């Protein structure tokens, strides 16, 4: 494996997309200290974990001393934030270091979050608090283990300085993460807003080559992204994940989950659930995520219009046709996922069961994760555990009878319904111990448990339990 000073980065984003980045350097990290290192991911990337722990590795992970092969840049993008358009967002506190080609031949960005102010900072300090960076590490790795496409976390490095936030000074940190790319809907919005069709075309060609090489046209690129996002959001809904800030600059072209700010997981199944401290109107509530995804994709289609046809009306007609495919693609992915979660036999018309289930969950609000996991107990003959999740256990009996009559497969259900997700109260407990006391043991235990979410293990019962009835309402903060 390659030492930190010998890493051969490639820079196709920089090579192909002049006009969509600014060369920039990371801010100093006065006393860098490695907090977490994902050794398994490092090995997948072809990196030497021991080298990453050394001075040169810390220089790479903070961006303060990168190999000659790297070209650190702040990426430019625009975006709709809570529905309001901002023409110039960009990496205000992040840098793209370069691209690694892994031993298996995959191309992965190495990107640093919290590496200091850039020209896109818009008045921010460009830094990141340790707590939110640990949250992204923990949740993104949990999502990966759940089989949800996601950016991944390589390391968290404390910088040795403090940053000021709403709740006072907090330790600063840099998160090193990887992704198949950081191309976003907002990247296309920025390129389109320049009015330079050639820049937009270069961006679209780059996206096709990198993510959707089978797309033979720009319209097909749009269709591929619609499909990828429909499948991604269906997976979010199935595991009870709430992104919290689905702005267009947080939607990737690859179909990976990105930017884990005020993210969290459902306890009670309530479509109106919002965890973000800044989402006052509930725009990004759990149940709104599919509709917001389609809204964001409409903005992507708008950005692509100059490439779809010289006639603006024909371009709109073409884009609208593809956008309208989202609903069917999402519903197909959603229902297919729920068929597996319910262990239903192939060929069964599941629509009546799924419609009744959606109503039952929304009205009765049982714990999302426990409900689906305990259904396997019911399929094995013991409905008691799942009935216990309801204030009125009899409320679920009618639906259970209809479902059991289909002959569900409990072993298959255990393979797709997790025992463990990042329970919000346990995440906060672990982050609090790490930030306030420097105690990483709770996070390390959570990472171990969440790395095998489908395997129920004796002694880990607390990681499967929701918070108690007296727990205060949970709220998350984005860390900017």
Image (tube, helix red, strand yellow):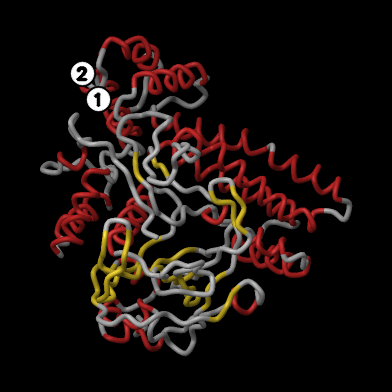
82 vs 139, left or right, is right
Q: Quadrant of the C terminus?
A: bottom left
Q: Residues within 10 Å of mark 1 (few under 14, many from 20)?
A: some
Does 421 appear above or below 414?
Answer: below
Does 397 appear above or below 254?
Answer: above
Say which residue appears at 37% left-offset and 23% top-offset: 408
Alpha-carbon distance for marks 2 and 1? 8 Å
Q: Quadrant of residue 274?
A: top left
Does 189 appear above or below 196?
Answer: above
Q: Is 246 or 165 nearer to us in this picture?
A: 165
Say which residue appears at 26% left-offset and 43% top-offset: 423
Q: Which mark is residue 377?
A: 1
> Which label lies toward us, 2 or 1?
2
Q: Is 10 or 468 nearer to us in this picture?
A: 468
**Going from the N terminus, do you reach mark 2 or mark 1 first?**
1
Q: Residues within 10 Å of mark 2 (few under 14, many from 20)?
A: few
Q: Is residue 106 visible?
A: no
Instruction: List x then y, in percent, for residue 262.
Output: 38, 49
Count of numbered circles in the view:
2
Contact flag, marks 2 and 1 (Cβ < 8 Å): yes
Q: Is residue 61 visible?
A: yes
Say which residue appears at 42% left-offset and 48% top-offset: 148
Does 359 appear above or below 337?
Answer: above
State the residue position of label 2.
Answer: 384
Instruction: List x then y, in percent, for residue 465.
Output: 20, 36
Say which residue appears at 62% left-offset and 62% top-offset: 187
Instruction: List x then y, in percent, for residue 302.
Output: 72, 50
Label 1 element class: helix
């Amino acid at each position: 494996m390659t030492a930190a000073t010998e890493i051969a980065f490639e820079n196709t984003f920089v090579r192909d997309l002049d006009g969509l980045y600014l060369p920039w350097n990371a801010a100093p990290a006065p006393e860098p200290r490695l907090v977490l290192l994902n050794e398994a991911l490092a090995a997948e990337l072809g990196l030497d974990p021991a080298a990453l722990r050394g001075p040169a590795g810390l220089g790479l992970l903070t961006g303060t001393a990168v190999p000659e092969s790297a070209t650190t840049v702040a990426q430019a993008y625009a975006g709709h934030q809570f529905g309001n358009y901002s023409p110039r967002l960009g990496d205000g506190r992040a840098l793209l270091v370069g691209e690694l080609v892994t031993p298996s031949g995959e191309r992965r960005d190495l990107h640093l979050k919290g590496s200091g102010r850039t020209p896109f900072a818009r008045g921010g300090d460009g830094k990141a608090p340790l707590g939110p960076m640990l949250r992204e590490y923990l949740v993104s790795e949990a999502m990966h283990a759940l089989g949800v496409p996601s950016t991944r976390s390589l390391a968290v490095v404390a910088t040795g300085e403090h940053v000021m936030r709403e709740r006072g000074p907090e330790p600063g940190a840099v998160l090193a993460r990887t992704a198949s790319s950081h191309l976003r809907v907002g990247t296309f919005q920025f390129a389109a807003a320049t009015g330079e069709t050639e820049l937009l075309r270069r961006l679209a060609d780059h996206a096709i080559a990198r993510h959707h090489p089978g797309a033979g046209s720009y319209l097909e690129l749009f269709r591929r992204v619609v499909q990828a996002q429909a499948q991604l959001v269906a997976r979010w809904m199935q595991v009870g994940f709430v992104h919290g800030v689905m702005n267009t600059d947080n939607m990737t072209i690859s179909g990976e989950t990105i930017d884990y700010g005020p993210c969290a997981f459902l306890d009670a199944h309530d479509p109106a659930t919002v965890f973000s401290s800044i989402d006052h109107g509930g725009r990004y509530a759990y149940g709104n995520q599919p509709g917001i995804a389609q809204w964001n994709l409409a903005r992507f289609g708008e950005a692509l219009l100059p490439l779809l046809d010289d006639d603006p009306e024909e371009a709109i007609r073409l884009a609208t046709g593809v956008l309208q495919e989202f609903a069917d693609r999402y519903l197909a992915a959603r229902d297919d996922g729920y068929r597996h979660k319910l262990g239903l036999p192939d060929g069964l018309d599941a629509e009546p069961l799924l419609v009744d289930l959606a109503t039952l969950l929304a009205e009765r609000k049982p714990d999302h994760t426990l409900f689906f996991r305990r259904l396997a107990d019911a399929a094995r003959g013991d409905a008691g555990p799942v009935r216990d999740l309801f204030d009125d256990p009899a409320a679920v009996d009618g639906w259970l009878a209809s479902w059991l009559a289909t002959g569900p497969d409990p072993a298959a259900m255990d393979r797709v319904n997790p025992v463990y997700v990042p329970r919000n109260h346990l995440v906060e407990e672990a982050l609090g111990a790490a930030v306030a006391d420097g105690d990483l043991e709770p996070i390390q235990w959570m990472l171990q448990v969440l790395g095998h979410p489908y395997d129920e293990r004796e002694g880990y019962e607390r990681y499967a339990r929701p918070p108690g009835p007296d727990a205060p309402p949970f709220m998350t903060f984005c860390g900017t």
